[in-house]
Amino acid sequence: MTSKKRRGKVKVTDDRLIDALECAISTQGSAELAILHLFNSYDFHLADLQLLLQEKGLDVSFSKVAYRDIAPRVGLDPLLKGNDMQAFDIHRARIPTSLFKAMVEDLGVVMNQYGEPRDHKNEEARSRFLAPLFNRTVALFKLTIVNTPESMIYGHITTRGRIEYYFLVFGRLSILVVEVKYKIGDADERLNAIAQVIAECNTCDYANDRAGFHSFLIYAVLCDGITFEFFSFDGKNAQPTFSRGVFCPPNAEPIETLAVAIYGSKTNTEFIFSLRPICETLFYFLLLAYRTGIQAYMERSVACGFRDNRPRESTPGWKQAHELACNALTLAVEAGAKAANRDKAANEKTEESLRCLQESLAAIPASHRRDIDLMRSWDGEGVEFC
């Protein structure tokens, strides 16, 4: 069973929310920090807060949050510049070579529209460039994972610093956020970009808590189109923790970032080679998000059955879907490790992993299954002269 709500236990009406926000701004020093303070003190709808921010004309953006202000909220010392973050292991989850080839082809189409990375002039172009690294793997989950490209909190006119990829599981549970920055310059700018990720994760955690999904990790990726860093946010305790994802290869130094090779050589083979670890690590995080979402709904189904003194009809389906999701993740990671050792058995494990994923999707209770397949309606003769 899930735990009870752990944040914002004092419910406030719209009028009291205005007073609470104004008081928090005066004590916290900014609207952004005030919002984070409200999450730990009051129970309110995010939609009400968004409406209030717009009515007051507040230009709110978590891109304004400085690392020195937010680090203590997740138990970090600003003076240590992130070196005191806890680490958690991350892995590559193998995808079929045919799928990776299709992703590279998609990237080629996008690059012929927006140019190579050094040609990009803003975050929108950089985000479009990154889209092919997600699109086909997200589609494998058949709308159980949906991308909502917006920030959880926005102000009057602000668009800068918004989350470019914000993934919901079953349309409700916030599990994975990807922050795209056009350019991350010096060390201080990088830390402030991490501060924005922390703030967005904190907001997602609050939204999950209000929706009745407690104590689930939120995963995050910070990228500028060249480098990728991976994080997790754990809000189950009074003071949340924010951790860094690290690869730990055998007999090698830990790796904290992945990078895209420079585009522009005669063959660009190295550029393509550098993309696969990134695509497979992103797929690993999507599998984590999917498994976590299934677990959340499974636990909710079990808890409802316990409350009603009779098992829910949906519980067996959720349990089977969860077991298969765990198998899919394990097999994909094992396939990634075998591929790193040039073991041809990697391909078999990869296919087995995808079979488990498809079986998991099929086991989800019908009320939560969705699928869009336009080609079912394809009329070859009809479209010829339509």
Image (spheres, rainbow, N blue to C red):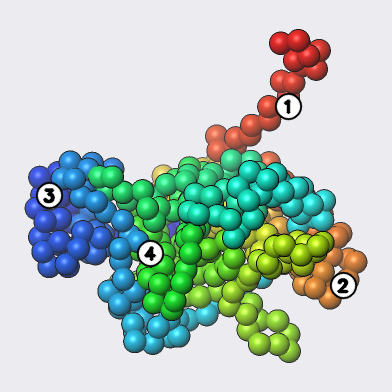
**Res 380 → quadrant:** top right
Dot 4, how many residues are within 10 Å of its Cα: few (below 14), some (14-19), or many (20+)? many
Q: Is residue 18 visible?
A: yes
Q: Amino acid at mark 2?
A: Arg
Mark 1 vs mark 4, foreground winner is: 4
In terms of depth relative to the viewer, which is nearer, 97 or 73? 97
In what element is the residue under mark 2?
loop
Question: Mark 4 = which residue?
Answer: 196
Q: Amino acid at mark 4?
A: Gln
In what element is the residue under mark 4?
helix
Number of disc labels: 4
Question: Mark 2 = which residue?
Answer: 342
In terms of depth relative to the viewer, which is nearer, 186 or 288? 186
Decide which of tag 2 and tag 3 comes sooner along the chain. 3
Decide which of tag 4 and tag 2 comes sooner along the chain. 4
In what element is the residue under mark 1?
helix
Decide which of tag 2 and tag 1 comes sooner along the chain. 2
Residue 45 in picture, x, y percent from top left: 26, 46
The correct choice, above or below, for 305 with respect to 76 in the image is above
Q: Amino acid at mark 3?
A: Ile
Q: Are marks 4 and 2 in contact (CB under 8 Å)?
A: no
Question: Mark 3 = which residue?
Answer: 18
3D distance between C-alphas at marks 4 and 2: 39 Å
Q: Are marks 1 and 4 in contact (CB under 8 Å)?
A: no
Q: Amino acid at mark 1?
A: Met
Decide which of tag 4 and tag 3 comes sooner along the chain. 3
Residue 274 in the figure: left or right of residue 162: right
In terms of depth relative to the viewer, which is nearer, 117 or 132? 117
Residue 262 in the figure: left or right of residue 185: right
